[in-house]
Amino acid sequence: MKKLLIVLAFAGVSVASFAQESKHSVATNSFFSNWFVQAGFDWNAWYAATEHGAGLPRSPFKKFRSSPGAAIAIGKWFAPEVGVRLKAQGIWGKSVYPGVDKIGGNFNKYWVLNGQIMLNASNIICGYNENRFLNIVPFFGAGLGRTMTHDLYAMDLSLGVQAQFRITKKVGAFLEVGWNRFEGDIDGPEYGGGRRGWDSHDNNMYAEVGLTYNIGRTGWNKVPDVDAINAAHQAAIDALNAKLRDAEAENARLRKLLDQPKVVEKVSESVKEFITTPVSVFFNLAKVDVANPKDLVNVRALAKYAKDNDASVLVTGYADSSTGSPATNEKLSQKRAETVKNELIGMGVSASKISTAAKGGVNILGVDLPKDFDRRATVQITEVPEHK
């Protein structure tokens, strides 16, 4: 027990040492991402309920209570911080009770199957880091055990901590210490019911070393920094706002002239050039909600112009071609166009004046800018009726 506490203390110190690492948000991946399998060898120490009052040595290294074992597990990380696994362990154990071969124990073949929740403490405290060498992962769960030697079953609770070491993106090693506490008899002798504390149940302490193999796609995508994207475009946005103000002033002048009898005047070429310049609205990876409400400021200005002039508007959706299948990107770009169309309708533009187009996955802006820029929809005035 002391050795387990020492390992847990070491794990806490190790996690604290990561505190200087920077954090960043990640996007949720598909269900088929971040699966893993584990295989390991362990050393078991058995403490039976029937030992109570027998005075047997408590050391986990005594021959009558310790034995080798093996374990396999399959699991999945649903987020960088939280995962689950199904673990089977066993093969060889010990029945420990007084008077057997005068040493207090004999062989006992068994298996235990546990479902466990895993918490990556390193990612919880320090944030996700794909290249971190060491991650500390506490776990807990419950399951079922069976002794094949005595044909008995028992429910159990499990608890432990695992230290995971990164070797490559696909392969890692781990050290694990754990505790299985059985709610019934699993070692053959009569269950020691009625007692309290440690001696009221059969207990299995183990230390395990093994390998982890990550199946399929692993890791987590970083959420695009929308503020950084907007900052990169700030100069262009400022210039566009200035053009909007000039266009509004020109539009007011034209409306005044149109109100005068027998005055016919077309919208100036400079204004046409401005209002037909696409305005971009950006989205996060695999999302159809507008990433930043600031992007809608310029859309609102174009919506006002469209309402005042009975103009037609085209909304075009895009996705970046570096992620997702063509079919997925086609649907994603259409949904992004529909999102912005609904925003325009909410701003007062008639739905009959709005048309949409979906371009699917592209690499247009990503040639000179990050691929995140292609995750967008554009809004553009396409037709302005001539006043008579």
Image: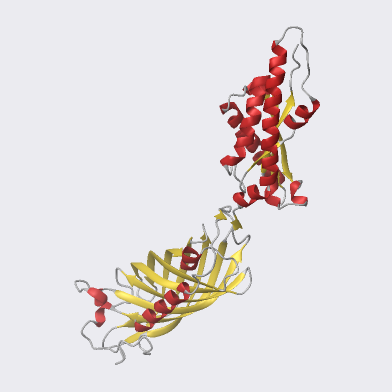
Examine the rendered structure and indicate whether residue 247 appears above or below residue 141. Answer: above
Q: Residue at x 76, y 46 (%)?
A: 364
Q: Please give left or right for residue 349 compared with residue 208 in the image.
A: right
Q: Please give left or right for residue 2 compared with residue 171 in the image.
A: left
Farthest residue, direction bottom: 102
**Quadrant placement of the N terminus:** bottom left
Examine the rendered structure and indicate whether residue 197 appears above or below residue 228. Answer: below
Farthest residue, direction left: 194
Q: Quadrant of residue 98?
A: bottom left
Farthest residue, direction right: 269
Q: Residue 362: x, y in percent?
A: 74, 45
Examine the rendered structure and indicate whether residue 148 appears above or below residue 378. Answer: below
Q: Quadrant of residue 237?
A: top right
Q: Please give left or right for residue 128 compared with residue 5 in the image.
A: right
Q: In this view of the protein, can residue 378 be seen by the observer?
A: no
Q: Residue at x 63, y 38 (%)?
A: 336
Task: In this rendered view, identify the residue nearer to me: 62 or 239.
Answer: 239
Tell me which colouring the rendered structure shows.
secondary structure
**Quadrant placement of the C terminus:** top right
Q: Residue 316: x, y in percent?
A: 70, 35
